[in-house]
Image: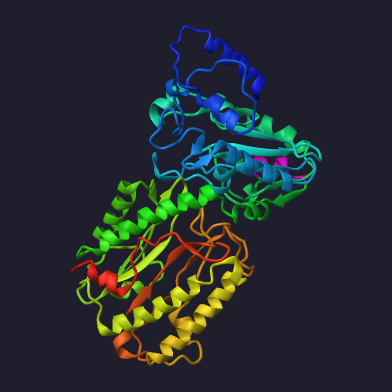
């Protein structure tokens, strides 16, 4: 296990060598100071001359400002998050988190890597095969941040790109203790043995390598190690921290919303004939606009395909006279935005499409207005209000709303939490009053089957309108306002 003391000696030797030095202040020194550590009394090698497994300010100043670990999120904010988690642990308790694993679609061909959200939230570290341990020291507010990572390996890096390594775990990501992930057995054992309680989600999911393999018999190595320990789920503790977004998190989501919203509006200006072409255009617009990726597999559903809530084949032809429902969004700094818009393929709504769309939009506006702390309502309550609004509107349009009619037409919840995940803070209840800083979606929709039970001119139409919203004290902050949704604005785009 490497500590700050041992790394000091290495850095002192490096600083006294003949290697050219940059006049720029090193990221290591700056990030450490930003996280509340005193300035080190020695020189360091400039980060601009090194290679890391992810962007840092010195190597990617176009992506990161000084002091940031990931776009928009500083070393100080990551340290604050870890401190909050440590404060929620019992005396001498520990929290253990594992990174995501590299997943393979076939042979050596891998899927795009996406870091485990809780791990990313606490560390900012984006590489696979890593473990973080937050160790509370006695009953004090002190804690030790352990980060075990892949060591530098020239041969492996020749194939797969740079690794940050153990030194960067200390000097860039501000770990107090580090070590090679290859020695995880010996590194974790004393931490587990000395812990009063262990908080982790690892036992419920598949992790990387044989150490954290998925559940089954015989027990994996990690299960054996914690067999006689008091183990509790970590998710409830971390949900309490993640559910309220910081100003920096909200700013990232607003950037994602702005870029994604403009992409939607640009898409509405054009005539599309194939779902896949529209999907490709949005993905391109998200990325060229500044997002890192699409936040999730998009829904691009023309005509009756919109009756499937999660239609993702996106391989059909778009027919004149029909609507297209698009559920997509971009990701910025790890934070997502979630948008759905429905518009006419020809640019003009038919009378029936207009009537149903306007009814849903009116309800959505009303539901969004409740996304403020002063309203003292929960997502579940907003869902109930949305249901009643849709019932009343559909009755006026000639729908028979008896029995289970509404569930048949509106089978999903009106909203969910968003953040690092599309469905953020899994397991966090939707029955508590919304608080300032929580971010949610508001997405009423009506999907009319081709069935004699429903008015003929509405059959086969699926419409959903969704925005991402940040709850504030007295008013909602709509994060996705650049995606036009008023009928007059949609139709004006083709004029």
> Residue at the location (39% across, 81% down)?
359
Which range of residues does the magenta coloring cover?
A: 220-229
Q: Nearer the viewer, residue 171 or 251?
A: 251
Quadrant into which the N terminus falls: top right
Q: Is residue 326 left or right of residue 216?
A: left
Q: How many numbered tags mark residues here? A: 0
Residue 181 in which image quadrant: top right
Question: Can residue 166 be seen in the rendering of this structure?
Answer: no
Q: Position of residue 360 (x, y in %)?
A: 40, 78
* Depicted 375 relative to depicted 161: above or below: below
* Depicted 227 relative to depicted 455: above or below: above
Is 434 colored magenta in this rendering?
no
Residue 36 in which image quadrant: top right
Question: Can residue 334 be seen in the rendering of this structure?
Answer: yes
> Residue at the location (28% across, 70% down)?
489
Q: Nearer the viewer, residue 21 or 328?
A: 21
Q: Nearer the viewer, residue 409 or 488?
A: 488
Q: Position of residue 256 (x, y in %)?
A: 41, 52
> Residue at the location (64% across, 49% down)?
203
Colour convention of the picture: rainbow
Quadrant into which the C terminus falls: bottom left
Q: Position of residue 306 (x, y in %)?
A: 34, 72
> Residue at the location (74% across, 36% down)?
142
């Amino acid at each position: 296990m490497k500590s700050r003391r041992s790394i000091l000696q290495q850095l002192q030797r490096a600083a006294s060598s003949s290697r050219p030095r940059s006049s720029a202040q090193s990221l290591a020194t700056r990030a450490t100071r930003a996280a509340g550590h005193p300035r080190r009394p020695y020189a360091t090698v400039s980060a601009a001359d090194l290679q890391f497994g992810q962007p840092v300010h010195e190597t990617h100043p176009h992506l990161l400002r000084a002091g940031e670990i990931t776009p928009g999120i500083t070393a100080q904010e990551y340290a604050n998050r870890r401190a909050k988690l440590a404060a929620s642990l019992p005396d001498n308790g520990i929290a253990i988190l594992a990174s995501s694993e590299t997943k393979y679609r076939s042979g050596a061909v891998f899927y795009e890597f996406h870091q485990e959200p809780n791990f990313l939230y606490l560390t900012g570290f984006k590489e696979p095969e890593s473990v973080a341990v937050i160790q509370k020291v006695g009953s004090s507010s002190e804690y030790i941040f352990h980060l075990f990572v892949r060591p530098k390996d020239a041969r492996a890096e020749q194939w797969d790109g740079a690794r940050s390594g153990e030194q960067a775990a200390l000097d860039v990501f501000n770990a107090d203790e580090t070590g090679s992930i290859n020695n995880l057995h010996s590194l974790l054992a004393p931490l587990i043995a000395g812990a009063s309680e262990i908080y982790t989600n690892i036992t419920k999911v598949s992790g990387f390598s044989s150490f954290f393999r998925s559940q089954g018999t015989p027990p994996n190595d990690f299960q054996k190690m914690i067999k006689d320990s008091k183990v509790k789920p970590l998710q409830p503790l971390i949900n309490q921290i993640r559910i309220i977004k910081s100003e920096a998190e909200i700013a990232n989501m607003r950037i994602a919303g702005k870029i994604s919203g403009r992409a939607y509006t640009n898409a509405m200006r054009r005539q599309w004939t194939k779902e896949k072409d529209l999907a490709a255009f949005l993905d391109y617009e998200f990325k060229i606009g500044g997002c890192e990726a699409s936040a999730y597999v998009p829904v691009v559903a023309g005509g009756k395909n919109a009756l499937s809530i999660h239609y993702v084949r996106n391989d059909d032809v778009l027919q004149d006279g029909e609507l297209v429902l698009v559920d997509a969004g971009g990701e910025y700094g790890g934070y997502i935005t979630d948008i759905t818009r429905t518009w006419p393929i020809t640019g003009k709504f038919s009378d029936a499409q207009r009537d149903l769309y306007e009814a849903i939009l009116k309800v959505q506006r009303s539901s969004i207005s409740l996304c403020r702390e002063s309203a003292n309502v929960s997502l579940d309550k907003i869902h109930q209000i949305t249901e009643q609004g849709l019932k009343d509107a559909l009755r006026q349009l000639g729908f028979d709303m008896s029995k289970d009619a509404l569930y048949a037409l509106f089978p999903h919840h009106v909203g969910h939490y968003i953040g690092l995940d599309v469905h953020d803070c899994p397991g966090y209840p939707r029955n508590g009053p919304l608080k300032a800083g929580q971010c949610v979606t508001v997405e009423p929709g009506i999907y009319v089957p081709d069935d004699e039970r429903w008015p003929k001119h509405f059959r086969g139409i699926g419409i959903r309108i969704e925005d991402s919203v940040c709850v504030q004290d007295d008013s909602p902050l709509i994060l996705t306002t650049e995606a036009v949704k008023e009928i007059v604005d949609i139709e004006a785009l083709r004029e």
